[in-house]
Amino acid sequence: MKTATPDLWPHTVQEAIAIQNALRDKVITQDQLGEVRHVGGVDVGFEKDNTVVRAAAVVLNFPGLELVDSALARAPVTFPYVPGLLSFRELPAVLEALKLLTITPGLILCDGQGIAHPRRIGIASHLGILTDIPTIGVAKSLLVGTHEQLPSERGAWQPLRDRGETIGAALRTRANVAPVYVSPGHRVSLPTAIHYVLACTTKYRLPETTRHAHRLASVLK
């Protein structure tokens, strides 16, 4: 699949924040997606004492959620670990993995934040802009915002709010299990994001897209 890989990536925190500030107005949080027949997932691991990013990209058919395509790519780490700026550390390798896919997904679920981010442009939103593919952020932990307590049943959710704005949802994907934090990435609304996350989650807490990508990113080959 095609991606718009930047010619240069930032090397300082100030440069990265400036890029986020420039891109965030391009993020679309209304539905602009067609029929979804394939869903994608991306995740990363690290090798060689955290000097190499190992990125996995997977494609599952939808709604069957069977793995139909996968790719793995590596790239040197060129940006430090800074909360809120993970896309600059991880996306160079993720984009290379996506280029190797033979099936282009109609939607990508990212292991990270969408607009539930201090500057409203987490890794899912950034990836959506660079690929022009609808994306959803599905994070295991809270980065920013607050929410009310959730009921215990699967499918229960509460709005995630920050500075008076709804930026996502805390979503229970499995009864009596800790929620995940869902937010629009790009070209997807919050209700649609919640729908697809639940549709991609079976008997585990995390979507099958994330589980397959994590497995591929974690097992050394």
Image (cartoon, rainbow, N blue to C red):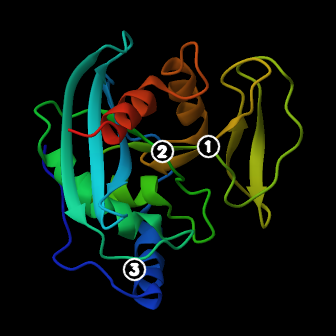
Of callouts 1 and 2, which one flags the residue occurring earlier in the amino acid sequence?
2
Q: Position of residue 182 (x, y in %)?
A: 60, 41
Q: In this view of the protein, which residue sits in the foreground, 81 or 132? A: 81
**Helix, strand or loop status at disc 1:** loop
Neighbor class of circle 1 (other Cα within 10 Å; few <14, some 14-19, many 20+) is some
Residue 20 shown left or right of residue 70 in the figure: right
Residue 28 image-quadrant placement = bottom left
**Identity of the amino acid at label 1?**
Lys
Residue depth check, mark 3 versus mark 2: number of the one nearer the observer: 2
Residue 43 image-quadrant placement = top left
Return the residue at label 3: 19
**Helix, strand or loop status at disc 3:** helix
Considering only vertical position in the picture, is 6 above or below 156?
A: below
Is any part of residue 132 visible from this angle? Answer: no
Question: Mark 3 and mark 2: span between their CA atoms?
Answer: 21 Å
Question: Mark 1 and mark 2: span between their CA atoms?
Answer: 8 Å
The answer to whether the residue labelled 1 contacts the one labelled 2, judged by CB atoms less than 8 Å apart, is yes
Return the residue at label 1: 140
Quadrant housing the C terminus: top left
**Identity of the amino acid at label 3?**
Ile
